[in-house]
Image: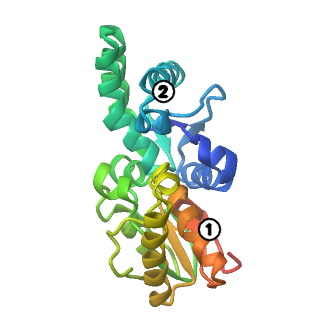
Amino acid sequence: MSVRAALFITCLNDTLFPQAGRATVTVLERLGVDVRFPADQTCCGQMHVNTGYRPEATALLRRFVRVFAPYELVVSPSASCVATVREQYPRLAREAGDARLEDEVDALVPRVLELSELLVDRLGVEDVGGRFPHRVTYHPTCHSLRGLRLGTRPQRLLRAVGGLDLVDLPDATECCGFGGTFAVKNAATSTAMVADKAAAVRSTGAEVLVAADTSCLMQIGGVLRRDRVPVRTLHLAEVLASGGGSQ
C-alpha cells in the first residue's frame, strides 16, 4: 500500500539547515513514500509558547492545522518541533476554548511523526539502504529522549547503515545546553553544559556527531568548530540518505 506524507520542514531547518529536509525526502522516496511539501507551512510556535506568547502560538497552531490536516501523515526531521505539536498543541487548543479546534488537534496530532518514528514504527524499516563508512556517535536530544521517547530507534537505523561504526557517547542523556532561549537567557550555564558535551564527543574518537535535531547540532557544532575539533555534525536524515564512501 502506498504511503503519502507531508514534510514539515520547520523554520530552523528551512532557514539554516535545508539539507536535513532534502535528506528526509531522499530517504522517504527511496522507500516509495509519496512526499508532499505544503508551501504555506511556517513556524510551529515553539519559541512563542516557551516564552509566554501563547496567543501568538495559538495563531500558528491554527495555521498548522489548516495546512496539514488534509494529509494522512506528517513527518518532520525535528524531534523538538514534533514534541511541541504533541505536548503543547492540545493545551493551547483547550486554552482557546474552541471545541472544534480541540477536535482538529486531537485528530491531527497522532499523525505527526518524527522521521525515525515513521521509518521504524509505521513503515517497519530499519535498513534504509544507506552507506556511510565513518565512525559516528549519536547525541539523543532532550526532546527526542524525554519528549518523544524515541528510545533506540535512531541508533537502530544508524547500525543498519552500511560501513557505519556507531560508538557510544559518554553521558549521552545530558543536555547540550541549547534549549532555545535558555542559551540566550542563561548563557554561562549553557556554555558550561555544551563544553561538557563537546568534551564527551571528543573522547569517542568519532568523525561525525549525529542527532535528530539540528538546533542541538548547531549548539554543539559551534563549540567543536571554535575549538577546531575535526568532528562533523550531521542530521540523522543526512546519514541515512548517504550512499557512498565519498560522504
Quadrant housing the N terminus: top left
Of the residues shown, which amino acid type is indicated by label 1?
Answer: Ser
- How far from the left and from the top, in percent, is residue 192? 45, 72
Q: Secondary structure beneath disc 2?
A: loop
Question: Would residue 102 appear left or right of 112 to someone viewing this image?
Answer: left
The residue shown at (32%, 56%) is: 150
Residue 176: tell me if it is visible.
yes
Cβ–Cβ under 8 Å for marks 1 and 2:
no
Residue 90 position by quadrant: top left
Q: Which mark is residue 242?
A: 1
Q: Estimate how packed mark 2 is, as few (under 14), some (14 to 19) or many (20 or more) residues with alpha carbons within 10 Å.
A: some
Q: Estimate how packed mark 1 is, as few (under 14), some (14 to 19) or many (20 or more) residues with alpha carbons within 10 Å.
A: many
- How far from the left and from the top, in percent, is residue 198? 49, 78
- Look at the picture and state if 68 lies above or below 183: above
The residue shown at (54%, 47%) is: 32
The residues tagged by marks 1 and 2 sit, at their Cα atoms, a distance apart of: 27 Å
The residue shown at (56%, 39%) is: 7
- How far from the left and from the top, in percent, is residue 152? 31, 65
Q: Secondary structure beneath disc 1?
A: loop
Pick the front one: 69 or 13: 13
- How far from the left and from the top, in percent, is residue 202? 50, 86
Q: Earlier in the sequence, mark 1 or mark 2?
A: 2
Of the residues shown, which amino acid type is indicated by label 2?
Answer: Tyr
Question: Would residue 180 appear left or right of 131 to someone viewing this image?
Answer: left
Question: Would residue 188 appear left or right of 143 to someone viewing this image?
Answer: right
Pick the front one: 162 or 88: 88
Residue 8 position by quadrant: top right
Q: Which mark is residue 202?
A: none
Q: Which residue is the site of mark 2? A: 71
